């Protein structure tokens, strides 16, 4: 169930941006947070990149500096309108992540940032299967999202944040073994790294 603060943060861009900046302090700021999943990736100007659940283009802005072939996908028309204004260098498509409107083997890289925690378990599996389908053989899926903290000091902050701004799906995600789920679908998990006391996870998996 959504909270009032969550609804307000999605209605007003300035509030969402402020919350994002505060939440990202634990990893060195929002700019670093948005690039966590991109570290170690080889992306050239002709690399075909899909920014899945791109929102208002917070991560897309970094992807277009690396590739001239970036597509942002999101189900929210309002978010896409903002993304087109913020990052006009990318192309955009309105669609749901569990039904990606591209053919098999379309992308070299699929990226998503802080979006999978919005999905129920069955949706999550469908999305990961779709990502696998649209990736080229040898392509990489890279993501950053919540994880159950392994440092007890971070549990209070994470719990308060989830209670104020997220729904039950975020709690579902931190109970999910994402690397294992990716392996079940067929991915080869090549990198898993935790940040902020274990409260954030970065995973890079290859098709």
Image (spheres, rainbow, N blue to C red):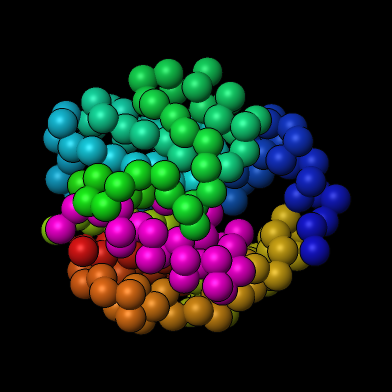
Residue drawn where x is 39% and y is 59% of the image:
130
117 within the magenta span: yes
Picture coordinates of residue 71, whole percent (x, y): 36, 34
Residue 12 or residue 17, whichever sits in front: 12
Left or right: where 168 falls relative to 113: right
| Image quarter in which the N terminus is found | bottom right
Using the rendered image of the protein, determine whether residue 160 is visible from the camera's viewpoint: no
Q: Residue furthest right?
A: 4
Residue drawn where x is 53% and y is 36% of the image:
94
Left or right: where 22 falls relative to 26: right
Using the rendered image of the protein, determine whether residue 115 is visible from the camera's viewpoint: yes
Q: How many numbered circles does the render carry?
A: 0
Dominant SS type (magenta): helix
The quarter of the picture where residue 48 lies is top left
Picture coordinates of residue 115, whole percent (x, y): 53, 54
Picture coordinates of residue 4, whole percent (x, y): 85, 50
Residue drawn where x is 21% and y is 64% of the image:
207
Q: State whether residue 190 is above or below residue 104.
A: below
Residue 161 or residue 140, whichever sits in front: 140
Left or right: where 37 falls relative to 45: right
Picture coordinates of residue 12, whole percent (x, y): 74, 32
Residue drawn where x is 50% and y is 79% of the image:
176
103 within the magenta span: no
Q: State whether residue 39 is above or below residue 8.
A: below
| Range of magenta residues | 112-137
Q: State whether residue 104 is above or below residue 120.
A: above
């Amino acid at each position: 169930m959504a909270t009032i603060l969550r609804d307000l943060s999605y209605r007003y861009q300035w509030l969402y941006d402020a919350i994002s900046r505060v939440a990202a302090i634990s990893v060195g700021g929002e700019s670093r947070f948005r690039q966590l999943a991109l570290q170690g990736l080889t992306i050239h100007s002709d690399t075909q990149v899909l920014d899945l659940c791109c929102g208002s283009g917070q991560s897309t802005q970094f992807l277009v500096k690396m590739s001239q072939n970036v597509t942002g996908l999101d189900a929210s028309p309002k978010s896409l309108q903002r993304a087109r204004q913020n990052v006009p260098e990318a192309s955009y498509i309105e669609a749901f992540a569990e039904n990606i409107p591209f053919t098999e083997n379309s992308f070299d890289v699929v990226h998503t940032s802080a979006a999978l925690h919005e999905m129920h378990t069955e949706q999550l599996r469908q999305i990961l299967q779709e990502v696998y389908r649209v990736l080229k053989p040898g392509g990489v899926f890279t993501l950053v999202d919540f994880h159950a903290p392994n440092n007890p000091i971070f549990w209070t902050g994470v719990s308060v944040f989830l209670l104020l701004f997220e729904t039950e799906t975020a709690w579902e995600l931190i109970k999910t073994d994402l690397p294992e789920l990716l392996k079940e679908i067929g991915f080869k998990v090549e990198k898993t790294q935790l940040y902020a006391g274990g409260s954030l996870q970065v995973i890079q998996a290859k098709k």
